[in-house]
Image: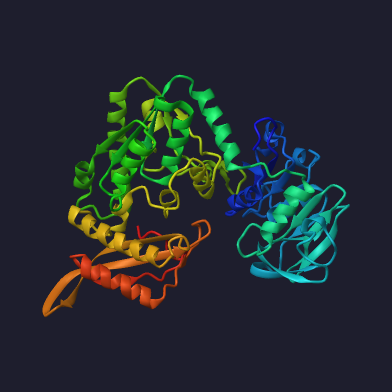
């Protein structure tokens, strides 16, 4: 991003697809800024954004049903290139006079698209008369294309799998280029935004940092800001960025609930107080949290207790500071995007993290959210740009409720200590094997199950530890990591030998779906 010129922008129109966010990721990976807006309000954003191109997302509805989401004519008349994806292709066709009908042969999953004609969308990527793997997910299909379009690619279930109007620079594809299972999808998006829309690759973290610092100063002025630190990457990056903008006007409040990983609290405190010299209030509230959690088994009840206690503790500490007008949050883009319902109305499904949920309303404060335009991987890039140590920025995701949800059954100090030790050994072995950055997330779970074991000549009756490791692109789906059995043997041996209270180790080989990544 350049401060002396407007940023080239792509507008993504959301029709409710589960993978709309992936479109944004692919566009940003090309160095181009983009925003997602619901189909019902996207046209209202044209003046402010002045996009150089428009992408119409997929969606779960049927474009031929009454009341289904439709393309606002203003978007197609705006005079910039348009790319329709799946439902977006169908909606564009209907809006321009084409015909969509129910598909008697549906396509879901991997498919082959055959290239029938040259097209600027895949220029330099796909060749004429060749077939390429894509990912399909559709029931309806285009049966008649609008005037000015031609068929450039076909598939067995979609004779109009790829259509193009080169004169208007309108393109439609029935498959999903944004998903991992369309191997060349990222190249197609790069072609669209750079070659067809003429966007420059000016979306950089260095430029974003400069822009964000200026925006924070403009918003806050000389007022005080408090930031709730969870110990995670998002809140830490937000705090360091805000501190760069306004210095000691920022005070961080770190509520240590006693549910963090081994040495994690010490690391956070040391980094903020010594490395960055940021004013920090460290509250050890572990006694209160663990006391209320003791004996609570139901996972959602655990989360609610943690959320309530965090808010109460944070509120108490903020009152001591006094005169604070702004609350900083590490809110990310996926948390603020509006999804759309089948009926076409926005259905906002923003999750409330345990450390921020309810605070703005309760404390009557204005929000500072410098990361709300970024995805998780972009936050990590910004963290590196700000000089955060790699071992901190590159950490695996860690749930807000901490180790409480890796303890199926009741929470006790003793169980937490056992779990911390096992988890630290497991991650140590992963790092020694050079696998930490290959794995999306890895952790230990202490099960409410005891089994008989033999140590020396004695009988033991101790707990079972489950190990979990997954690979993923975005956390939406995940596969278990296929460790070498020798690795698992080494990790299990160390845990059993070094952690009193565990005499058996098992490995979780469940993918997501049907399982979740976390156990609770």
Quadrant housing the C terminus: bottom left
| Residue found 65% across the figure and 31% down from its top | 3
Residue 515 is left or right of residue 56, and the answer is left
Which x, y percent locates residue 511? 45, 67
The relative height of residue 483 versus residue 186 in the rendered view (above or below) is below
Q: How is the image coloured?
A: rainbow
Residue 254 is left or right of residue 223, and the answer is left
Task: Classify residue 419 by image quadrant.
Answer: bottom left
Quadrant housing the N terminus: top right
Q: Is residue 26 visible?
A: yes
Which x, y percent locates residue 251? 36, 29
| Residue found 80% across the figure and 67% down from its top | 127
Which x, y percent locates residue 307? 32, 42
Task: Classify residue 164 by image quadrant.
Answer: bottom right
| Residue found 75% across the figure and 60% down from its top | 101
Work out whether residue 19 or residue 301 is closer to the camera in this orientation and state it.
Answer: 19
Q: Is residue 63 visible?
A: no
Residue 215 is left or right of residue 10, and the answer is left
């Amino acid at each position: 991003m350049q401060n002396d010129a407007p940023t080239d922008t792509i507008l993504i129109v959301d029709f409710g697809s589960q993978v709309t966010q992936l479109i944004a990721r692919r566009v940003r990976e090309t160095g181009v800024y983009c925003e997602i807006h619901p189909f019902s309000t996207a046209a209202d954003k044209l003046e402010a954004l002045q996009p150089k191109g428009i992408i119409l997302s997929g969606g779960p509805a049927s474009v031929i049903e009454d009341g289904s989401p439709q393309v606002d004519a203003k978007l197609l008349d705006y005079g910039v290139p348009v790319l329709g994806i799946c439902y977006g292709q169908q909606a564009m066709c209907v809006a321009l006079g084409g015909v969509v009908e129910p598909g008697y042969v549906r396509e879901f999953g991997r498919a082959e698209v055959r290239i029938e004609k040259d097209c600027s969308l895949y220029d330099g990527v796909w060749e004429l008369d060749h077939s390429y793997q894509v990912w399909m997910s559709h029931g309806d299909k285009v049966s008649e294309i609008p005037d000015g379009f031609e068929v450039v690619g076909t598939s067995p279930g979609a004779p109009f799998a790829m259509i193009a109007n080169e004169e208007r620079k309108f393109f439609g594809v029935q498959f999903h280029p944004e998903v991992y299972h369309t191997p060349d999808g990222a190249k197609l998006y790069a072609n669209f935004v750079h070659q067809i829309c003429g966007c420059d690759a000016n979306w950089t973290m260095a430029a974003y940092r400069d822009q964000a610092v200026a925006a924070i100063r403009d918003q806050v002025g000389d007022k005080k800001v408090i930031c709730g630190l969870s110990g995670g990457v998002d809140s830490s990056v937000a705090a360091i960025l805000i501190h760069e903008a306004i210095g000691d006007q920022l005070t961080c409040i770190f509520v240590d609930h006693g549910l963090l990983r081994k040495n994690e609290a010490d690391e956070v405190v040391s980094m903020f107080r010594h490395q960055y010299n940021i004013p920090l209030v460290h509250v050890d509230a572990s006694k209160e949290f663990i006391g209320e959690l003791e004996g609570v088994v139901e996972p959602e009840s655990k989360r609610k207790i943690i959320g309530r206690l965090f808010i109460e503790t944070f509120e108490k500490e903020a009152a001591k500071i006094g005169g604070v007008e702004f609350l900083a949050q590490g809110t990310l883009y996926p948390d603020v995007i509006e999804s759309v319902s089948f009926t076409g109305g926005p259905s906002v499904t923003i999750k409330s993290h345990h450390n921020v949920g309810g605070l703005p309303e309760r404390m009557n404060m204005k929000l500072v959210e410098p990361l709300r335009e970024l995805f998780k991987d972009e936050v990590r890039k910004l963290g590196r740009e700000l000089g955060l140590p790699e071992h901190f920025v590159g950490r695996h995701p860690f749930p807000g409720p901490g180790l409480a949800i890796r303890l199926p059954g009741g929470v006790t100090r003793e169980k937490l200590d056992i779990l911390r030790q096992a988890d630290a050994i497991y991650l140590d072995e992963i790092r020694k094997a050079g696998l930490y950055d290959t794995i999306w997330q890895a952790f230990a779970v202490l099960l409410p199950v005891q089994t008989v074991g033999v140590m020396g000549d004695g009988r033991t009756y101790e707990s079972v530890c489950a190990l979990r490791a997954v690979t993923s692109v975005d956390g939406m789906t995940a596969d278990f990591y296929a460790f070498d059995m020798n690795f698992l043997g080494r990790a299990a041996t160390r845990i059993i030998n070094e952690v009193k209270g565990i005499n058996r180790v098992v490995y979780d080989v469940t993918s997501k779906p049907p399982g979740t990544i976390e156990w609770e």
